[in-house]
């Protein structure tokens, strides 16, 4: 392959635009609204309308000098002879893969992605390319996510078994919380779901943007007894905090791909680990690498080594990108 | 197996002692024999397999997974059993696994050469949590925060029987504990076991509240003993066998062949296990070299010989109870007491 027109810190060489830059830049393309990808203070941000709405909700209208909404599938000419289009990544609402085309070369920056069905995110679209920059959050063969419906069934079994206790589920406030609520609704659970204060704003935003979540109630000021047998959604940091003492004998659950390692769940005091992930697992990562037809693979954001090794075994040119600040800042809830 | 896998998961993840007990109680009350007996053996660490070892499982997995990827994964997960359960790459249509009893039978009867195939097929058939339980079962390393005593406590709670009455007979019981469960269910009387296998719960030392207790304790009722820096044990001799129980009722005789092979007779002795020569107690650190080892090396036996400092004789049987298996010409009682003298130190009561 010709020398790629993207540098290893994800800067588009012909026009200087960065993708998901960790530091404020003049112009940035943002794949999705999670804090390790979407930062405050860029001169201009190009992203999907959902991602722009999420960034405005989290950081304020003035988080970027200029907002540039680009709907999925529309091609936009940028300077330097580069064409950009955004394609669903299936990670959270509005999450996108970035396809860049320049002189016949196609580069896809995947952002975070998953390929499973999720009513709270646009379904992943496979994009053929020459160079794939893939995430590797769960880039080890021990990560084989179970079916989310099975995990929700485990949760509901536990709710039925302990009618006198509340179930508090630690979820990242953007994406995971809404996904878990939506999965509960899909499985037929129609009781009100209670929300920690930190969850309310983003749940409202999802509902405004057309994602049905059923009846949600703030957990604040609800009498303790009323929460027996109920499900409460809270940030992972809150479930072991003083906050959870207002719940009746809570069962501590966390919904995250990291919960597959039981010994870890146990050490962190999680009684009900729910392996529900918004990232591709090992099998999906490999499937995606193969199906994009890319001959060059750059691996970032996670456990790069195993995926680089596997790609090389397949005869692909693969290397890790060590991008600073792409740390596991949202590890607990992904 | 599904039910047992669920139990193991609850036990591993529930931090509350009471909830662990509750989960075990429910399991034992609702599971038929002999499955529940085998489950009890697994939870109390009383079950091990001759051929199914962690190394066999590792071989089965590394035949299917790239060794470098396995190493990276193991490094991340940090637990061999969990790594194997999570990394297994084949997922068949989930069929019901064999029952616990059938599984143990399979593990015990399958030849070494056929084992890898059996384990591979079981791993493929199992659902994720069952695979985790299966590996725990096969490697014997549960790490779920349950010890034998907690399991026995659950049995006592389930049946309303006294925990002490249960602990007394525990070491005389045999797999799959059918007689025990019959007693616990109220369908039979307590199993009668050889007294040599019977653990007699120890009278432990308690601090004295000087303000309250001294006035009501009569010195004539007590004898004094130094606080020796060893571990409290109960040495039980019967019918040519010796058991050495720790204060929690674990039989540690296997780790102290130098002691148990050199004593015999008919008695239940309460005392302190120490190491040293000529009954000179060495520091606890020396004794520690001998503790928690399945097998004692000759070097350790030579360096730190063990003996028991006896506090009390809880039970003796008159010499007429039968001939001692000593060589002819040597009277039974003489040989017996000589043998005992080599390793057991008794103080004279004055």
Image: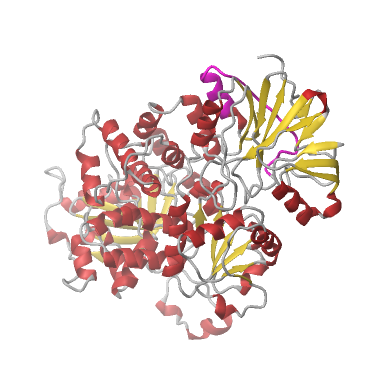
Quarter of the view holding residue B293:
top left
Total number of numbered discs in the rendering: 0
Front residue of this view, candidates B86 and A298: A298
Residue A15 on the magenta span: no
Q: Vertically, is A322 above or below A207? A: above
The residue at the point 63 percent across, 52 percent down is: A175
Front residue of this view, candidates B296 and B145: B145
Residue A311 on the magenta span: yes
Q: Vertically, is A57 above or below A90? A: below
Residue B124 percent coordinates (x, y): 33, 38
Q: Residue furthest top?
A: A2
Q: Vertically, is B140 above or below B187? A: above
What residue range appears in magenta? A306-328
Residue A324 percent coordinates (x, y): 75, 35
Residue B112 percent coordinates (x, y): 24, 30
Q: In the shown orientation, is residue B302 left or right of residue B93?
A: right
Residue B338 percent coordinates (x, y): 26, 49
Q: In the shown orientation, is residue B243 left or right of residue B216?
A: left
């Amino acid at each position: 392959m010709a020398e790629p027109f993207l540098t290893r810190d994800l800067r588009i060489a012909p026009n200087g635009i960065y993708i998901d830059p960790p530091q404020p830049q003049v112009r940035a393309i943002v794949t999705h609204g999670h804090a390790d990808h979407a930062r405050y203070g860029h001169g201009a941000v190009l992203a999907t309308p959902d991602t722009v709405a999420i960034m405005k909700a989290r950081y304020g209208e003035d988080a970027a000098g200029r907002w540039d909404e680009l709907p999925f599938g529309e091609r936009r000419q940028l300077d330097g002879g580069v064409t950009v289009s955004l394609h669903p990544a299936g990670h959270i609402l509005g999450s996108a893969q970035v396809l860049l085309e320049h002189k016949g070369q196609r580069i896809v920056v995947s952002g975070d992605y998953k390929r499973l069905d999720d009513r709270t995110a646009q379904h992943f679209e496979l994009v053929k390319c020459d160079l794939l920059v893939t995430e590797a959050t769960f880039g080890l063969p021990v990560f084989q996510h179970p079916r989310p419906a099975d995990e929700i069934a485990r949760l509901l079994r536990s709710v039925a078994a302990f009618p006198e206790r509340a179930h508090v589920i630690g979820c990242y406030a953007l994406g995971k919380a809404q996904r878990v609520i939506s999965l509960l609704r899909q499985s037929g659970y129609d009781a009100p779901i209670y929300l920690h204060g930190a969850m309310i704003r983003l749940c409202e935003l999802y509902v405004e943007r057309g994602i049905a979540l059923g009846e949600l109630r703030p957990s604040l000021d609800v009498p303790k007894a009323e929460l027996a047998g109920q499900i409460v959604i809270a940030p992972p940091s809150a479930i072991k905090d003083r906050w959870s003492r207002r719940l009746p004998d809570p069962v501590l659950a966390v919904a995250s791909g990291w919960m597959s390692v039981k010994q870890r769940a146990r050490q962190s005091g999680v009684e009900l680990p729910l392996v529900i992930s918004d990232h591709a697992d090992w099998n999906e990562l490999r499937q995606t690498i193969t199906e994009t037809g890319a001959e060059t693979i750059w691996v970032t954001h996670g456990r790069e080594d195993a995926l680089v090794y596997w790609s090389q075994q397949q005869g692909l040119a693969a290397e890790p990108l060590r991008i600073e600040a792409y740390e596991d800042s949202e590890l607990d809830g992904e | 197996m599904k039910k047992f896998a669920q139990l193991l998961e609850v036990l591993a993840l529930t931090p509350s002692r009471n909830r662990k007990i509750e989960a075990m109680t429910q399991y034992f009350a609702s599971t038929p024999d002999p499955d529940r007996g085998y489950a009890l053996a697994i939870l109390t660490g009383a079950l091990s397999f001759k051929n199914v070892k962690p190394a066999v499982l590792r071989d089965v997995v590394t035949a299917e997974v790239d060794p470098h990827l396995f190493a990276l994964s193991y490094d991340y997960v940090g637990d061999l059993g969990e790594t194997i359960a999570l990394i297994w790459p084949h997922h068949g249509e989930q069929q019901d696994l064999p029952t616990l009893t059938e599984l143990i039978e399979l593990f015990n009867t399958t030849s070494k050469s056929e084992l890898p195939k059996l384990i591979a097929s079981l791993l493929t058939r199992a659902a994720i949590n069952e695979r985790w339980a299966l590996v725990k079962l096969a490697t014997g390393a549960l790490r779920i925060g349950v010890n034998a005593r907690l399991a026995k406590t659950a049995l006592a709670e389930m049946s309303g029987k006294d925990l002490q009455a249960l602990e007394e007979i525990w070491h005389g019981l045999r797999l799959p504990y059918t007689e025990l469960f019959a007693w616990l269910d109220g369908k039979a009387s307590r199993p009668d076991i050889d007294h040599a296998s019977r653990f007699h719960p120890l009278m432990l030392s308690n601090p004295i509240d000087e303000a309250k207790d001294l006035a009501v304790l009569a010195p004539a009722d007590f004898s004094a003993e130094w606080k020796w820096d060893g571990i409290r044990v109960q040495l039980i001799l019967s019918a040519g066998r010796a058991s050495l129980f720790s204060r929690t009722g674990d039989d540690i005789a296997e780790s102290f062949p130098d002691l148990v092979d050199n004593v015999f007779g008919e008695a239940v002795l309460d005392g302190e296990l120490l190491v040293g020569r000529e009954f000179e107690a060495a520091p606890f650190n020396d004794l520690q070299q001998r503790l928690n080892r399945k097998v004692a090396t000759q070097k350790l036996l030579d360096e730190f010989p063990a003996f028991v400092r006896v506090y009390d004789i809880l039970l003796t049987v008159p010499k007429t109870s039968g001939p001692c298996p000593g060589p002819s010409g040597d009277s039974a009682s003489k040989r017996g007491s000589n043998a005992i003298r080599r390793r057991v130190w008794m103080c004279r009561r004055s």
